[in-house]
Image (cartoon, rainbow, N blue to C red):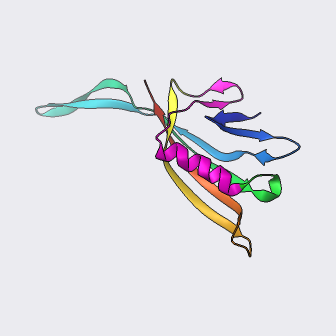
């Protein structure tokens, strides 16, 4: 197993392949600037912002997946604002849970019967500290 995002399991097995690519993390600090007359402002560190990350998931029926079912799972996570663990290689990412902040779907191949055969999903996740 490569990792998980809540109930979504990333793995390569005999039956199916579900992986991600273009995983990118963003970490930022918060600073407040104090104005000083006739001088440059002074910065004060006030804490860290919640981490964010983005990744792309390919959902391909030829790789043993049901793209519509996989999309529905991700849509429910977004719609129900589920905060879930994000694990890669057995290592929990961040300090808390993660929520799907946005989800962009591309239906790349639809069969002549209207079934989704291949789709890609770009997810933007945000660390959800409790």
- How many numbered markers are drawn? 0
Residue at (48% x, 33% y) in the render: 127
Vertical order, 117 against 38 (above or below): below
- Viewer-nearest residue: 50 or 106: 106
Most extreme residue toward the right is: 14
Image quarter for residue 110?
bottom right
Residue at (67% x, 60% y) in the render: 119
| 78 magenta-colored | yes
Most extreme residue toward the front is: 113
**Magenta residue span:** 67-93
Q: Quadrant of the N terminus?
A: top right
Residue at (61% x, 34% y) in the render: 6
Vertical order, 21 against 90 (above or below): below
- Viewer-nearest residue: 48 or 74: 74
Vertical order, 8 against 92 (above or below): below
Vertical order, 86 against 111 (above or below): above
Residue 77: x and y in percent read 53, 43
| Residue 46 visible in the snapshot | yes
């Amino acid at each position: 197993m490569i990792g998980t995002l809540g109930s979504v399991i990333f793995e390569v097995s005999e039956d199916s392949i579900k992986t991600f690519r273009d995983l990118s993390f963003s970490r930022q600090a918060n600073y407040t600037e104090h104005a000083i007359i006739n001088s440059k402002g002074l910065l004060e560190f006030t804490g860290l912002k919640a981490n964010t990350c983005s990744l792309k998931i390919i959902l391909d029926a030829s790789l043993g997946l049901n793209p519509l079912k996989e999309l529905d799972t991700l849509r429910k996570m977004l719609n129900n604002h589920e905060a879930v663990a994000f694990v890669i290689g057995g290592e929990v990412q961040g300090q808390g849970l993660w929520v799907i902040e946005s989800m962009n779907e591309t239906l790349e191949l639809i069969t002549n019967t209207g079934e989704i055969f291949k789709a890609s999903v770009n997810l933007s996740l945000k660390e959800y500290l409790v």
